[in-house]
Amino acid sequence: MTIASLLTLALGLAASVAAAPSSTVNRRATCDRAVLLAAADAYVASQTAGTLASLTALTAKAGFSYVENNVKKDMSTGVAAKAVKIDSRRTIVDMTQCATFTELIAASNKPPYVIGTQIHHAGDGSVALVDSVASTTGSWLFNATATLMYARQEKWDPIPAEKRDKREVIQAAGDAYMDLWSSATAQSRVPWGTPCSRLEGGAYTGKGLPTDSCAAGIPSNHSQAPNSNRRYVIDEEMGSVSILCVWEHMMNAADSHEFRLEGGKLRYVHTMTECGGRTCRL
Ligand SMILES: *[C@@H]1O[C@H](CO)[C@@H](O)[C@H](O)[C@H]1NC(C)=O
Ligand SMILES: *[C@@H]1O[C@H](CO)[C@@H](O)[C@H](O)[C@H]1NC(C)=O
């Protein structure tokens, strides 16, 4: 996260704390699910239309940031400002951090995209940060047609309240997986589940079998550069954590990983990895 966006979030938080009675000095109290979902919808509407109006109506008046593939830029020059025909859209909601993550799959668009976008809100509900990984042709294992086909086979329904994992458990699972490249002990910390399917770009480890595993093809070399600068959106109802980061061991790529746990075990992993406009290579 950039200094400016951190500052924006901090200022927003300070403003909301100042305005709140002391008994409700808690960021949680300021998260309004309807506001968060309205902003995610506005983002999707803007992306579909190719005009930013729906989204910019909700952005913070001061200090709004747009980050695309780990680079801060003017949103009007980014993928967010292009008209994109969207085939699939799925959003998770973080009611503690006031944020959302939306996965967009645009297989029939020219060019095709698979986009992962975190939207972080300031204390007053306005949009402080749009942080996006926009993968396309040349990105790691990119094939949006395949991504769409496999994503549509999966079931991401809300987890019944009594079966939900705590946000710390969900985040720890995602972090352990992201540590696999740089830590020899990470593998034992990942709550591997079976079945588990990983949608890595357009490649899929799921065969529809009860034995499907996400441990297939994980790194055997744990001495690689880490996955750094992690930004999180965590949704207990969906059992999911989105982590955007720098994929240092592959061309310092911009990376999006989303994990879903069911009953404390890994069920789905979705990845997008964009290598600064170049073709991703190991
Ligand atoms: C992308 O995936 C689809 C569906 O599996 C497949 O038919 C197509 O050949 C793939 N395209 C490329 C370029 O690999
Ligand atoms: C593991 O990765 C590091 C960093 O890329 C590299 O220097 C080292 O040679 C690799 N070790 C093996 C056994 O491949």
Image (spheres, rainbow, N blue to C red):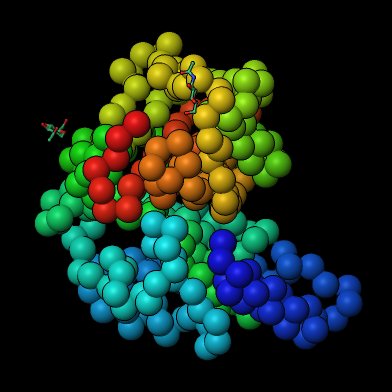
The residue located at (57%, 49%) in the rendering is 230
The residue located at (43%, 11%) in the rendering is 211
Q: Is residue 209 left or right of residue 60?
A: left
Residue 261 lies, in percent from the top left, at 55, 33
> Looking at the figure, which quarter contains the N terminus?
bottom right
Q: Is residue 145 left or right of residue 60?
A: left
- Residue 72 position (above or below residue 265): below
Residue 143 lies, in percent from the top left, at 21, 39
The residue located at (78%, 85%) in the rendering is 19
**176 and 282: which is toward the camera:** 282
State the image quarter where residue 156 is shown. Answer: top left
> Looking at the figure, which quarter contains the C terminus?
top left
Residue 151 lies, in percent from the top left, at 31, 38
Residue 217 lies, in percent from the top left, at 40, 19
The furthest residue to the bottom: 61
Work out whether residue 220 can be spotted: yes
Work out whether residue 114 can be spotted: no
Q: Is residue 136 left or right of residue 129?
A: left
- Residue 82 position (above or below residue 56): above
The furthest residue to the top: 211
Q: Is residue 257 left or right of residue 80?
A: right
- Disc count in the image? 0
- Residue 57 position (above or below residue 261): below
**253 and 40: which is toward the camera:** 253
The furthest residue to the right: 22
The residue located at (48%, 59%) in the rendering is 118
